[in-house]
Image (cartoon, rainbow, N blue to C red):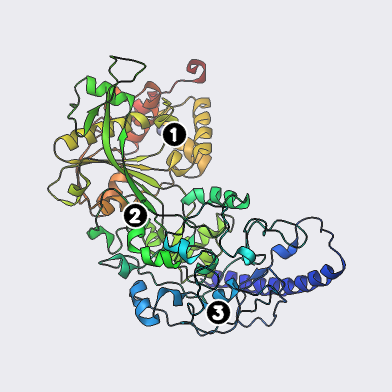
């Protein structure tokens, strides 16, 4: 902890120094403006000064039109509420709009002469000067009208009264004609709990019985939400980077928010016991209902977005056609339906398709809960996440008061076959396959592993279970190559093939390339089962002891485990299966040391 403290102190000093430099640069820049308009070679340093210094920083930067800063005056921050969520805040502060620091309100209406030295005067005055055009409102750059319609607007659309807007068309160039990419010229590198105006909306992870007691997940850096957000990271997991590219290219406004009209789920996964307490720490169980729960606050400008979306779909996979033809499961017209004929092939049987409900889930980590699950200290978790993303999220260190992190990683998809409402009924038979993604096999049919056959086996067992009156669940987790990634995975393949691919060497090869055998950390996986209300899995379609231990360890009973049937294992995938069985994976087969040594994969000579 002492080490962490040192890092924090250093960061603060760095910020203070950068603030001083920023002020100097602004002064120089202003002087230059009067005599020259020549552009500077290389990056313009004035685009990267820092604010976020401690309130005691003595330097007051000179302001020029178009620049802005969050003032560092010593506004008494409102008492932190530790429970009660937004409702509580409404009671204590009147309305959501009063949550927004008045400093930001002043900034959004700073006069053209640019003296945006906003003075924070406390809470409760935010909405006083609001007008219907969106200027001088707590809604940042959104018009009140647009916000009340769900806030969505095509990315490049200029908001009303855009003269002061950062990033509005034609307004995103500085005096030298350089593009600023739609952002304010001053950068907030990080924030600190002690900083003036910092006032995160309380969030009480695991609280209930409704989302109001828990509180909204707000991780937005748009101007009107920056000081009240209660989460680090960004929405959409790894796709947040692509969104950044769209913004950088001017295709999307920096303050854009989605139009959520009609995006709510077509089926309900209602709150259940597992939503409260510490059973779910890696995503937000309320994430699919944001549109409804926080509709009013969203219209008012609170940037709370859905992190789960649910829809209905058909699954159509060739192997399922074959299994249906073999009579593995009937075409019941409900769960399994007959595929319509294709006009190009009259009279040709197009096989079957399967009715499913599905949900896409983005990661939302409750850091104390994730740390506890992994059995480590929260500060170590924060430090590791900071360091090993190249310092990507400094607030992991500077904002220990913020407990939520939306990491830039893949999420998962839940496929439900049968009636989702029955999952919470303890008398329902449940078949479940937790499946970690493997595009090489799942999509492209590689035969070096058993992923796709296992997935098909899981889906067909899920169908049969649903047809017996139960519910089948496939959880598809975005975790390529045991969360080591495909680049590592293919290097391991090469190493295996060059080393005479044997089951005996299987795990050793991975460990030598990746340092670890596996980085999936299955202890977080059962969250999704608790989300669905599953208390017992009658048929677990997995032979992984790591998955089994995690599920049982989280308090869910597992009645039967099923390994992949022998006849579905491709020849080259035998190495993986035998190595897994020998290392302790569940199987009815006995794999001796001798067998493991004897099990060899295809070498490259035979492979093409
Ligand atoms: Zn695979």
In the shown orientation, is residue 377 left or right of residue 194? left
Mark 1 lies on residue: 439
In the shown orientation, is residue 14 left or right of residue 521? right
Of the image marks 1 and 2, the number of the one nearer the N terminus: 2
Image quadrant, ligand 1: top left
Instruction: Kindly identify the residue that appears in the image at 42 percent across and 64 percent down.
Output: 299
**Pointer 2 residue Cβ closer than 8 Å to ligand 1:** no
Of the image marks 1 and 3, the number of the one nearer the N terminus: 3
Sort mark 3 into few (<14), some (14-19) or many (20+) by Cα contacts within 10 Å: many
| Residue that sits furthest to the right in the current view | 35
Mark 2 lies on residue: 288
Looking at the picture, how far across and down is residue 521, in whole percent?
A: 39, 49
Tag nearer the camera, 1 or 2 = 2
At mark 1, the secondary structure is helix
Tag nearer the camera, 1 or 3 = 3
Disc 1 versus disc 3: distance between alpha carbons? Answer: 48 Å
Of the image marks 2 and 3, the number of the one nearer the N terminus: 3
Sort mark 1 into few (<14), some (14-19) or many (20+) by Cα contacts within 10 Å: some
Instruction: Kindly identify the residue that appears in the image at 66 percent across and 67 percent down.
Output: 186
**Pointer 1 residue Cβ closer than 8 Å to ligand 1:** no
Classify 463 as above or below 363. Answer: above
Tag nearer the camera, 2 or 3 = 2
**Do residues under tags 2 and 3 come within 8 Å of each other at their CB atoms?**
no
Badge number at residue 196: 3
Looking at the picture, how far across and down is residue 227, in whole percent?
A: 51, 71
At mark 3, the secondary structure is loop
Query: Which of 392/43 is in front?
Result: 43
In the shown orientation, is residue 389 left or right of residue 360? right
């Amino acid at each position: 902890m002492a080490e962490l403290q040192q890092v924090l102190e250093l960061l603060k000093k760095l910020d203070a120094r950068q603030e001083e430099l920023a002020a100097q640069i602004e002064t120089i820049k202003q002087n230059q403006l009067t005599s020259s308009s020549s552009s500077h070679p290389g990056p313009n340093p004035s685009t990267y000064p820092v604010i976020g210094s401690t309130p005691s920083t003595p330097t007051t930067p000179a302001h020029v039109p178009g620049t802005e800063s969050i003032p560092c005056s010593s506004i008494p921050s409102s008492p932190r509420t530790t429970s009660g969520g937004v409702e509580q805040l409404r009671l204590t502060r009147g309305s959501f709009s009063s949550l927004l620091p008045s400093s930001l309100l002043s900034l959004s209406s700073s006069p053209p002469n640019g003296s945006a030295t906003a003075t924070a005067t406390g809470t409760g005055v935010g909405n006083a000067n609001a007008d219907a055009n969106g200027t001088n409102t707590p809604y940042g750059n959104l018009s009140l009208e647009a916000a009340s319609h769900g806030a969505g607007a095509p990315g490049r659309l200029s908001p009303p009264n855009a003269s002061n807007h950062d990033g509005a068309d034609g307004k995103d160039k500085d005096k030298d004609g350089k593009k600023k990419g739609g952002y304010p010229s001053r950068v907030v590198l990080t924030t600190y709990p002690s900083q003036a105006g910092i006032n995160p909306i309380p969030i009480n992870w695991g609280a209930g019985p409704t989302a109001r007691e828990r509180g909204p997940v707000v991780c937005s850096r748009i101007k009107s939400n920056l000081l009240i957000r209660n989460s680090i990271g960004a929405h959409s997991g790894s796709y947040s980077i692509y969104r950044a590219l769209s913004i950088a290219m001017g295709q999307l406004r920096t303050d854009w928010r989605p139009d959520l009209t009609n995006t709510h789920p077509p089926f309900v996964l209602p709150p259940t016991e597992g939503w409260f307490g510490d059973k779910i720490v890696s995503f937000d169980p309320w994430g699919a209902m944001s549109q409804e729960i926080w509709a009013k606050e969203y219209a008012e400008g609170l940037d709370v977005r859905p992190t789960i979306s649910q829809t209905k779909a058909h699954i159509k996979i060739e192997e399922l056609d074959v299994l249906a033809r073999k009579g593995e499961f009937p075409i019941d017209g409900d769960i399994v339906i007959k595929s319509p004929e294709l006009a190009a092939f009259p009279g040709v049987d197009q096989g079957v398709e399967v009715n499913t409900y599905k949900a896409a889930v983005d990661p939302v980590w409750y850091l104390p809960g994730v740390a506890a699950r992994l059995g480590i200290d929260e500060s170590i978790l924060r430090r590791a996440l900071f360091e090993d993303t190249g310092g990507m999220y400094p607030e992991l260190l500077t904002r220990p008061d913020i407990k939520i992190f939306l990491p830039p990683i893949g999420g998962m998809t839940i496929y439900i076959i049968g009636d989702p409402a029955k999952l919470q009924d303890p008398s329902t038979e449940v078949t479940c396959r937790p499946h970690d993604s493997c595009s090489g096999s799942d999509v492209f049919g590689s035969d070096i592993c058993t992923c796709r056959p296992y997935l098909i086996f899981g889906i067909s067992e899920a169908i049969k279970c649903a047809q017996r009156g139960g519910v089948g669940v496939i959880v598809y987790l975005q975790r390529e190559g045991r969360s080591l990634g495909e680049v590592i995975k293919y290097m391991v393949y090469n190493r295996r093939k060059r080393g005479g691919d044997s089951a005996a060497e299987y795990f050793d090869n991975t460990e030598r390339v990746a340092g670890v055998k596996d980085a999936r950390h299955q202890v977080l996986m059962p969250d999704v089962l608790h989300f669905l209300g599953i208390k017992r899995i009658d048929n677990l379609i997995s032979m992984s002891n790591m998955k089994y231990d995690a599920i049982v360890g989280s308090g869910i009973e597992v009645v039967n485990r099923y390994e992949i049937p022998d006849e579905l294992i491709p020849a080259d995938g035998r190495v993986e299966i035998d190595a897994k069985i020998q290392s302790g994976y569940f199987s009815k087969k006995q794999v001796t040391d001798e067998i493991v040594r004897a099990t060899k994969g295809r070498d490259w000579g035979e492979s093409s």
